[in-house]
Image (cartoon, rainbow, N blue to C red):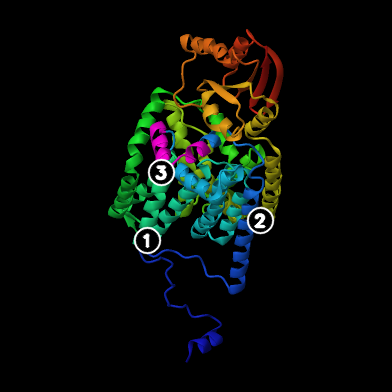
Amino acid sequence: MSARSRESRTGKSTPSTAPEPSTELPKGQERQPAALAPRHTSIALGMLGLVILVGLSLRFYGLDHESLWLDEGKSVGVASLPLGTVLQKVYETGTNPPLHYVMLHFWIKAFGDSESSVRALSAVCSVASILILYSIGVALAGRAPATLAIVLLSLSSFHIHFAQEARAYALFGMFSLLSMYFLLKAEGNYSVFNASGYIVASALVLYSHPHGLFVIVTQNIYILPGLLRSARTGALHWRRWALMQGLTCLAFSPWLGVLATKALYIQSHRLWYPRPSALGLLSAIGTLCGHSKVISCLFMVLAAAAVVTVRREPESPTGRSSHESVGKSRWRLSIRHSRSVYFLCVWFLAPVLIPFLISQVSAPIFNWRYFIVASFSLYLLVSIAVIQMRPRYMQVIILAVVILWYPVRTIEHYKEVNKAQWRSVANMLKAQAGPDDIVVVSADFCLNYILPYYMRGSGIRQIGFSRGANEEEQEDFSGEVEAERLAGLLEQTKDHERVWLVLGHIKANQAGRIIGKLQEAYRVKGRHEFYKVQLLLFER
């Protein structure tokens, strides 16, 4: 008699003895996202394309709305030199690795050095980051969290700001994402291509920014515990990981000595960064969320919810009468034992906490701009928490708050003045200064890089007074050095009836002494206030 007929006679089902299919993947095999039906695939691709289009539009809109600021002027000034001089200049100063300067050098050759052109390189890198983050998100959490994460990234005023700046931050963020992407690929499926991709991307991270070193440290914090426990993590084992790290160091070795020299220099000549406090740490994290305390708190709660789960479970009736246990329950707190969540937590915390802790015991190196590499993991953690949230109405409410608030902050970003208005200063000088006038720039650093960019072809004589607060090799202006410069100031201007004084990137007390010295021979005829720059006119 068949099993079906026996079941119909007895009313009971016969237990199946067939083994359940295993969910474990063979070693070295990478988990792939579940296949979608053709219709769902088209929707997913359409959403991806729409988000990238929105991100691209926001990053290229108003590229030349604001003036270049001091550091952008340095980027353009150095990158405009012949390539050999660019490398020599970067090597001598040792302030930042050369990759951004070299790429900007060729970019300027191809597209010119207008404000829009020099910033477009960062905009392109920022748009590419959206696509790379989506690929990482799909591999770690699936398409829904990945899509939400790139929505947050594309609308982020924090990332739009750096996409519209001719500095290395967007490039640094893009290559850090690429390095993380190939790390996950090599861990899931080790191959020559994936390992080579990781080595190249990681070397580019190191050549993009000094804090690229902390990206590599972060990856080792993620990988090494697994290797210590079981001698391998995924498809990686000790020899493979050591080879990848060794070749990365070898690729970076030409600049390693310069980085070490800079680190020693910072120890003896502290940068302008203040020592960060716990409140400063929270404020820096808040910038990743768009400078909103409400959204910052919401993101932190959601990021924690992606790591920790809270469930209400009924109490065990053991030792209780049935009427005592009915309806009783308790809350249980547990941590998600997920490799993906662990990876994202390390990725978010290490690049932020390592510079913070170093800054407590050594020369401060803590700057919110460098946390661009940590922002991507935060967006993924938030997205995972939102997609997993129950009940559904809470998910809808949080999505509405975040998605509706982000465009508001983005609109505010375009309305705000965020950068020193050197273009307006130069335009006023070119319009009102005569050929016999002289322009005194308070800081040589500004005279060397930013003002000449806007004063090209004006024919107006310009001189500098001091190196200024942002020059790596700062001078001590107390005593003889400042007195000598102040005495020489009137000597340099004695043949001019009118003197224009540009004050920017200088301490207030020093600016006051410069004004006082000029007033010994001139009187103040006019004063014009611009964002972070002042322009004064002196006449005899």
On the image, the x and y values in percent for residue 144 come to: 59, 60
On the image, the x and y values in percent for residue 136 come to: 50, 56
Are the residues flagged by discs 3 and 1 in contact, CB closer than 8 Å?
no
Between the residue at mark 3 and the residue at mark 1, the CA separation in whole angstroms equals 20 Å
- N-term mark: 3 or 1: 1
Residues drawn in magenta = 75-94
Mark 1 burial class by Cα count in 10 Å: few <14, some 14-19, many 20+: few
- N-term mark: 2 or 3: 3
Please report the residue visible at 62 percent of the width from the left and 46 percent of the height from the top.
Answer: 156
Q: Nearer the viewer, mark 1 or mark 2?
A: 1
Pointer 2 residue: 391
Please report the residue visible at 42 percent of the width from the left and 31 percent of the height from the top.
Answer: 358
- Answer whether residue 88 is magenta in the image: yes
The foreground one among 126 and 124 is 124
The foreground one among 439 and 442 is 439
Between the residue at mark 1 and the residue at mark 2, the CA separation in whole angstroms equals 43 Å
Please report the residue visible at 67 percent of the width from the left and 32 percent of the height from the top.
Answer: 427
Q: Nearer the viewer, mark 2 or mark 3?
A: 3
Are the residues flagged by discs 2 and 3 in contact, CB closer than 8 Å?
no
Q: Which mark is residue 193?
A: 1
Left-right relation of 494 to 259? right
- Answer whether residue 65 is magenta in the image: no
Between the residue at mark 2 and the residue at mark 3, the CA separation in whole angstroms equals 44 Å
- N-term mark: 1 or 2: 1
Secondary element at image label 1: helix
Amino acid at dot 2 = Pro
Q: Where on the picture, by quarter, is residue 429?
A: top right
Q: Where on the picture, by quarter, is residue 255?
A: top left
Secondary element at image label 2: loop
Amino acid at dot 1 = Phe
On the image, the x and y values in percent for residue 94 come to: 40, 33
In the image, residue 235 above or below residue 176:
below
